[in-house]
Each structure stands twice: as structure tokens, then as C-alpha cells.
Amino acid sequence: MDKNALLEILVPVLASLGCALILSNLLFFKVKTLSLYGLLAISLSVLVLSYNLNENFKFDAGLFPLLISAILTVSIMLLITSTKIDANDLRLENSNSKFVLALIGLIGAYLFFIEILGYYIATSFFIFTCASVLKYKNLLTLTSTIICWCLVIFLLFEKVLKINLSTGIIF
Amino acid sequence: MDLISFDNLLIGIQTAISLKGLCMISLGVILGILVGAAPGMSPSMGVALLVPFSYGMNPALAFIFFVAVYQAANYGGSITAIAINAPGTPASVVTAIDGYELTKQGKPGKALGAAVLSSAIGGTIGALLLIFLSGTIAEFGIQFGPAEYFWLAVFGLSTVIAFGKANYLTSTIGILIGVLFTTIGLDPFTGEERLTFGIIELFDGISFIPAMIGLFALAEIFTQIENKDHQKNKLLKDFSGELPKFSEFKETIATLIKSSFIGTFIGVIPGAGSTIASFISYGEAKRASKNPDELGKGSLEGVVACEAANSSSVGGALVPLLALGIPGSATDAVLLGALSLHGLVAGPALFSTNPDIVYGIFVSVLAANVFILAFGLLGNKIWLRVISTPKPLLFTFVIAMCILGSYTIKNSIFEAWVCLFFGVAGWILKKLSIPPAPIVLGLVLGAMIEINLRRSMLAGGVEILYSSNLAIILAVLSLISFLFPFTRRFI
């Protein structure tokens, strides 16, 4: 296997490993250094990628990212060492990460549906679901606020700023 | 070239003191006070959320509006700090020490009155120093070449490490992450693709505004939800109270003026910001006070010192932004992004190419203080009612606004994904004690560092970086700044 092919495999492997470490840490382990190892793996993947760029580019376009990612990798290593020394710093402070991850998933779904359902319908569903997830219980206020929001956004963007928001592909 | 001239000042007055200008300033002040007063929302978050709405606006009016929001948000934080001991902004944490004590003693009106008066006067002093200093520094900045700009950007980042709130190592990592993101896209010199993974939307690089909205707003919301802050709503009591008497306020005038100067000069240092200005001014007020033991137990002098420094730091922080294109604070970094959204570049050239914007900003900072005084004295009870909006509802609409704002930048859903990506990254990095401000400053200054470094290299190699006295001075200042965290324990 030649060097370029090896480097091309190494980049996604390191990046996936880093993301997996951070995600599993948020969900289960909640140890600060583990997330730092994840960050280190991502930084290493960028370093490998920049090295590859630098090798392939005729000019110095790859040099700056290579330099920055190298310093970043060293800095993260130093941070891992200093965090290990400081025993009080080992645990992540919060343990409500699953709730936030679910909310991030909800926002992701909202972004996915904006282009399918259109901005106004997707936003109405999102605001209703998000406020309910955050335990807001006054349905009357919530419904009236959603209607007001959609009206204000429609008038401001479509009529004043002349910016057309997504209408979706279904309707 | 005379950058500060009476003619240009007249242009600024015409722009800001027109009907549209005054409407924008008053709207900016109202929104700014609400943003500052709402716990969990910061001035940078407020301005970042409002930037996309300026897309179709006249740039001069847009910046008049942003500066009014920025100035008012710095004051707004004191309202909830004094009334319910829930500082709206990090800088108003110090205000709460004496302000809330006064509320507990049944004198909230005195504390709120002193806060608004000192904010308005401090902000005005900051604005006057801004007008004086930025023109002078901008004239000096005309002499800058690539080497000087390279060192200036390095110096800007090094001061974040030296004076920032975070540990030097986490600040450094934050800056490097920000700088690394600026290398995404087509290379500015050769046009080669860098770190784009073939995604066409990334060819122009990462858009500043969605990234900033994600880092400042979404990440903050995620952190607060994780801390279950959305379930904590402090109850507001109805209160009324008399304002401070002239004789009481007169005793704090010396502290007010001194704190305003401290605030402005600390504001000029990139990365230092209003929080550090408030802490230092409070410490200095306590040191110089005739009754130092009174501070901390409900002293007007304590409130005045913090608020004057906090508000005057806005003028100070705008100095390096307008004169040299280096943001003095996180909110200034957002303003720099907003300038690029309108196709403008901050720096000495802006004084001559767009005097309506630069001088409009000067006049807007001054005028915003008058509106703050009026709205602050008349509307404290109203602000307290409005900001008691339940947090689940507030957070939901802030998230919706983040997505809408990012989406409308280029009318592309990709920008909303960029915002979400930076929101998630900012939240995870915050958990690792890496704050968003260094990342944003890295994002803003990264391209300036790379382009000027490579221009210098093309012009004649590494020695170009040390070819002028000014470049050497800036290099030495950067080195001192980098070493400051290690040496301050010996000072």
C-alpha cells in the first residue's frame, strides 16, 4: 500500500475514533480526559490530512494548516497531561448530556424537514416540540406565540427584506 | 490624510441623528437592554442573532443599530443583577455584589438609578475617547504593511491568552481551533482546495456569522439546558424605590470618572473585555475609597465603579476594531463578521471610504447613552416584567432565531447546519473548559495571519517580518503577552 492511500485511510479512521470517543463519553463515561483523547484523535486526523495536502501541493498552501494542526496536537497533549495531574478536574461537571443530545437530534430533524415541509410548517412543529420537551406547559400561550412568530417572520422577510424562505417540496 | 475631520463628523451626525437613525438607535437600545437583562444572553449573543436581519439594510444604519444594542446590553445586565441577583451578563456579576445588597436593604431604586447614571456617563466618556483614539491610531495604522499586520494579529491573539478568563492552554487550543477553521476553503493565493472534503459550499470557507451564532448562542443554550437552568425562574417582586439623591451621587463622581478611564483602556486590549474592566475598577474603587469596608455591603460607589467601567469598555473595545481591524472583544468579533457580510473591511481605509459608517458608529455610541438614560430611568419595571418570560419559551425561540438567522445569510440550509455544528462543537469544548471567545477571535484573525505571513514570505522571506521597527515592537509585545501567564506569578 502506498503512502497516500495509507494516509487517506488514516484520516477518516482517526476522525471517526475521535467522534466516537467524545459521543460515548457524553453518553456513558463522563470523564474529561476521554473527551480530550477524542479531540486529540480529531486533531491528529487534521494533521495527517494537512500533511497529505502539503505533500501534494506544489506551492505552500498546505504549510499553514500543517503548522497550526501540529501546534494544536501538541497543545492538546499538554492539556491531557495537565488534566491528568489535576485529579479534581477529571470528571465532567454535568450529567444531563443525553437530554442535550436529544435536543440536538431534534434540531437536526428540524433542519432536515425545513426543505421538505417548508420553513413555516417545520418551524411551527419544531417550536411546539422543543418547548414541550423543555417542559413548557401553557398550550394557549405557545400556540399564539407560534402564530405571531410565523406572521412576524413572514412580514419581515417576505415583505420587508424580500427574502423568500423555503416553501418545501411537498406543498 | 486627515482621518478625523469635522466634515466627517457632520456626516456621522446626519446619518445617526436622522429619523431612521434615531429609530434604529432607540430600537437597538430597547433590544440591547432586554438582551443584557435576560440571564443567559450576552451582548455578543444578542448582536450575533441580530446580524442576519441587517442583510437588506443600509450598512450605516445597520451598524448604528448594532452599536446601540452592544452599548445597551452592557448596561442591561445590571438590572437583573440588582433586582434579583441574577447577573444578565458576566460583567454585571460585580454589580450584583453591592447592587443586590441595596435591594435587600429596600433601596433598589437607588442602585438601579446609580447604575443607569454611571452607565450613561461612563459610556459617554468611553465614546469620546473612542472618537479621539481611533482616528489617531488609524492614522498610525496607514503605515502598516503585511509584516506589521501579521504581528498585530498575533498580538491580538496573544492578549486573549494573557488576559482572557480561561487558562492559557485552553485559550491557546481555542485560538488554534479557530485559526484552523479559517484554512478551510480555496487557498487565497493558489486557489487549491484545502480541507473541503469536496463540499462545494465550503469552497468559500466557513461563514463567520453562522459559526458565531452557533458558538455564542446555541452552545450557551445547550450548556444552560444541561445545567437545568431553564427550570430555574426567579420570581420577581414588585418594587418601587427612590433614585439616588444628587448629594449621594456627587460623592461617587471621582470613582465614576476613574472607572470610566480604566474601562476604556482595558477595553482597548483585545481579549480583556468588560468583565475584567469591572473587576479591576471595583478593586481600585475599594482601594481608593474613604470607606473601603462599605463596599460589598451595599455601597453606591461599588455599583458606580462596575457600571461605569463596564459601559466605557464598549468605546474602548471599538478602538482597535475600527482603527486596525482587530476586535477588542467577542462582540467586536461579531461586528467584524457583520462588516464582512456587508462587503466592508475594518481598518484605517474604512475612515475614508465609509465615513458614514465610522462616524455614524461614533455618534450612535454617544446617542445610545442618552437613550439608555431615558429608558433606564423610566422603564426598569417594564424590563423586569418582560424578561420574566419563562426560560423554556425563551430558549426555544432563541434556537429558532439562530437557525433562521443562519439560514437567511445565504438563503441556504447548509449555513444552518454550520450553525448547528458550531453550536455542538462549542458546547463540547465548553465542557472541556475551552471557551468560545478565543475560537471566534481565531476565526476572525486566522486569515489575517496567514495572508500577511505569506505575503511577507513572497516579498522577501522571514527577514521581512523583522524589517521595520514597528514590526519588531509588535513582535516583542506579542512575546511578552504570550509569556505573561507564566511570569505573572512572579510579579
Image (cartoon, coloured by chain):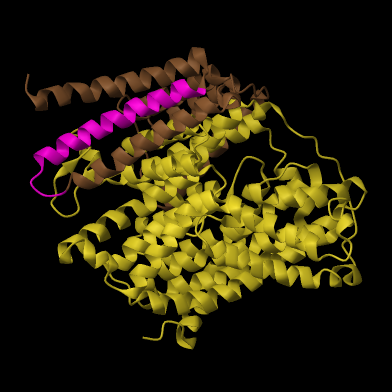
Chain colours: A brown, B yellow
Q: Which is the main secondary structure of the residues drawn in magenta? A: helix
Give the residue at x 13% y 52%: B190
Please tell me which residue lies in front, B148 or B37: B148
Residue B330 visible within the image: no
Considering every residue shown, the one lying at the far right of the view is B105
Task: Please determine whether, in this image, residue A84 is positioned above or below residue B173.
Answer: above
Quarter holding the C terminus of chain A is top left
Left or right of A99? Residue A68 is left
Task: Please determine whether, in this image, residue B457 is positioned above or below residue B438.
Answer: below
Please tell me which residue lies in front, B203 or B434: B434
How many numbered dots are placed on residues in this image?
Answer: 0
Residue B35 visible within the image: yes
Considering every residue shown, the one lying at the far top of the view is A28
Give the residue at x 47% y 41%: B169
Task: Please determine whether, in this image, residue B223 is positioned above or below residue B187.
Answer: above
What x and y, as percent, mark residue B373? 72, 65
Quarter holding the N terminus of chain A is top left
Please tell me which residue lies in front, B167 or A129: B167
Please tell me which residue lies in front, A128 or B259: B259
What's drawn in magenta, residue-wise?
A32-60
The answer to whether residue A46 is magenta is yes
What x and y, as percent, mark residue B45? 53, 46
What x and y, as percent, mark residue B443? 37, 48
What x and y, as percent, mark residue B51? 46, 52
The answer to whether residue B186 is magenta is no
